[in-house]
Image (cartoon, helix red, strand yellow):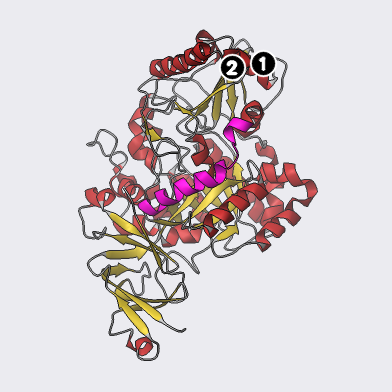
Amino acid sequence: MEKLKVLTANRIHTMDQGRPYASAVAVSEGRVVSVGTLESLQPWLRRIPHEIDDTFKDHIILPGFIDPHTHLRLSGTYMGLNYVGPIDSTDPQGRLVSSLADRNAVIARLKLLVDSRNDSGTSEDNHPLVAWGYDPGMQGGHLDRKMLDAISTEVPIWVMAYAPHIIYTNTPMIDQIGVDVDSRIHGLGRYPDGSLNGWFIETAATAVASRPVRDQLYANGFGRDALALQGQVAVNSGVTTTADMIYGIQSFDTEWDDHAEAIANGMLPLRMFLVPFEPTLRKRYGDDFLSFYQTMAAKSTDRLAVHGVKYVNDGSYPSMTLRLNFPGYLDGEEGLAGEIPWQDMFDRMLPFWNNGIQIHSHANGDETVDMTLDTLAALQNASPRFDHRFTIEHYCISTPAQARRLAALGGVASVNPYFVHYRSQLHADQGFGPDRSEATARLGSLVRSGATFALHSDYNLVVAPMHPLTAAWIAVNRLAADGTTVVAPGERISVDQALRAITIDAAFVLNQDHCLGSIEVGKHADFVILDDDPYEVDPMKIKDINIRGTILAGEFYAAKT
């Protein structure tokens, strides 16, 4: 080492339980050389030239936050479409796009867009009107073909939900997609009489529905532009590592190249783990899917790497398409499983299990959690493994018994806690009923079971921010959207447990705790700089702590408003 940089701070929380506090950290070549005090660092400082950097001497340093489940590239794409969502958003130029309060307002905006096309004389070119952001829970129920036909029976209308598990279409769009009442596609929606209702639900059906609008969704250069936009969002949120949980949905090579270019050009100051979507991996590469996986893995660096494999086994919490055990939905809905039949799940997962590739299994509803745990048990019985870190993704609606079983099988959970605050009261009367809505994200049960878990955002494919301090605030307080009601108070966790779930435990879930997640000798020098100490402030103020920026491999990136 030619030189050391020594950062001083009011306090450093290392997340190393053996040496939890420090006031100085020495960095070289992007890694931590030593952490402690200026006095304890002297054996290094006497031997190696160094500089003392007091820029953050009045601030708090923690390990860089890890959000182990996002969709940065894909979500940046949708921000360029006509927006019809329930919260304010921004366009690719960063300009405000206002929210729409309810379904009537959405229909009015879509009608305005259609009328604008009619007035400009472009309505006869059969070019679909594409929109994104609809939320059936927050905006008063689902759209359907008849509602969209009332807007136009000439202009094809294509509307993707904010959580992109449902696409809503009118009759001209259905005709353009090329399906009819005799089509047999998993997730093709129907009215009770069997006629098509304009819904395309989950990956198999949404892929079919997206073919006619592919050029609008995936415009030239959109991936790099999206990553440039989201890179600063990550810095503003204190995030230094994330995993894209649906790699390959457009193109494995293109998506990899976009991330590599964004990192090389300084637009994406993150460590990115790309998690291949298993159905796409098999469809593209057939029996050679494992060989191709190893080829991708061989290209990995400490900034960009392929990791694990992803399965989607039910629908969405906000779109109300997840699968529930008895008594099910309030209004008799059933939700939808993923495109892989559950009875085939063991056979589909076994090759990855036997090759030591970590499995990430999307399961939002408790029926799907049961299926996932049954599959994990079958894998263990067929080929017992230690330290497999089989991960249930989202883990929204579950039971204490499932938490204990997850721990007993050696599994871990990556949990979306945002719905506790943003949607629990809404879904008590929309979809799930009060018992399940109030107990969404049972983190306390996971703590009591001894299961390791992380907190994630699923950004930007759910109506919630990517902001780990907000995730921690929700986990600690479980305050509902009304600002007064605490839902399922026994599922609250401590501040330390919540902060571990966005640092060292999140690193564990991504199988990276040997090099990320804590400030320890030899690990990557990835930090977040805070104005206040989350261990010392009122727990109700954790989400309001100002983030100065991040340090990635020893280099500072400033947050921007």
Q: Which amino acid does label 2 sit on?
A: Pro
Q: What residue type is labelled 1?
A: Asp
Look at the numbered disc 2 and give the secondary structure of its residue: loop
The secondary structure that dominates the magenta segment is helix
Residue 139, given in percent of the width and then of the height, sits at 39, 23
Nearer to the camera, 368 or 312: 312
- In the rendered view, would you say 252 is above or below 436? below
Dot 1 and dot 2 residues touching (CB under 8 Å): yes
Q: Name the residue under label 2.
A: 156
Q: Residues within 10 Å of mark 2 (few under 14, many from 20)?
A: many
In percent of the image, x 52 and y 63: which residue is there?
Answer: 512
Question: Magenta part of the protein: which range?
Answer: 215-237
Residue 87, given in percent of the width and then of the height, sits at 36, 31
Residue 220, given in percent of the width and then of the height, sits at 60, 39
- In the rendered view, would you say 32 is above or below 42? above
Residue 482, given in percent of the width and then of the height, sits at 25, 33
In percent of the image, x 52 and y 38: which residue is there?
Answer: 77
Nearer to the camera, 215 or 45: 215
